[in-house]
Image (spheres, rainbow, N blue to C red):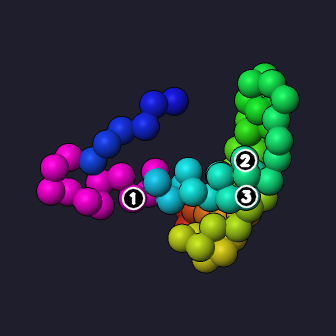
Amino acid sequence: MKQSMSRKGNCWDNAPVESWFASLKKEQVHLQHFKTRAQARSNIFDYIEVFYNKVRRHSKINNMSPANFDRKWTMEQEQQVA
């Protein structure tokens, strides 16, 4: 993954990515001491795929986990079709 820099004069361009990396560092990386890169990669992968994308509550989606938000949205779509 390669981080990008914002264009000149556009300070908000990278804000969502910077916020995500801040969450990753605060909630996972800085709480651990990794002995190897492989251990760090595995731990960060688990954090993203198991916790962040499925369990962690996100303020932008009414403090729901992405998995719960997706289930709710799917049910609402099915009810609109019926």
Q: Is the magenta region chiefly helix, strand or loop?
A: loop
What's the residue type where badge 1 is placed? Ala
Q: Name the residue under label 3.
A: 27
What's the residue type where badge 3 is placed? Glu
Q: Mark 2 points at which residue?
A: 29
What's the residue type where badge 2 is placed? Val
Q: Mark 1 points at which residue?
A: 15
Question: Is residue 15 positioned above or below 41 on the image?
Answer: below
Q: Mark 1 or mark 2, which has the lower sequence index? A: 1
What's the magenta region?
Answer: 7-17
Q: Is 46 in the magenta?
A: no
Q: Which type of secondary structure does the marked residue at label 3 adopt? A: helix
The image quarter in which residue 68 lies: bottom right
Q: Residues within 10 Å of mark 3 (few under 14, many from 20)?
A: few
Q: Where is residue 6 shown, x and y percent of the image?
A: 27, 47
Q: Residues within 10 Å of mark 1 (few under 14, many from 20)?
A: few
Q: Which type of secondary structure does the marked residue at label 1 adopt? A: helix
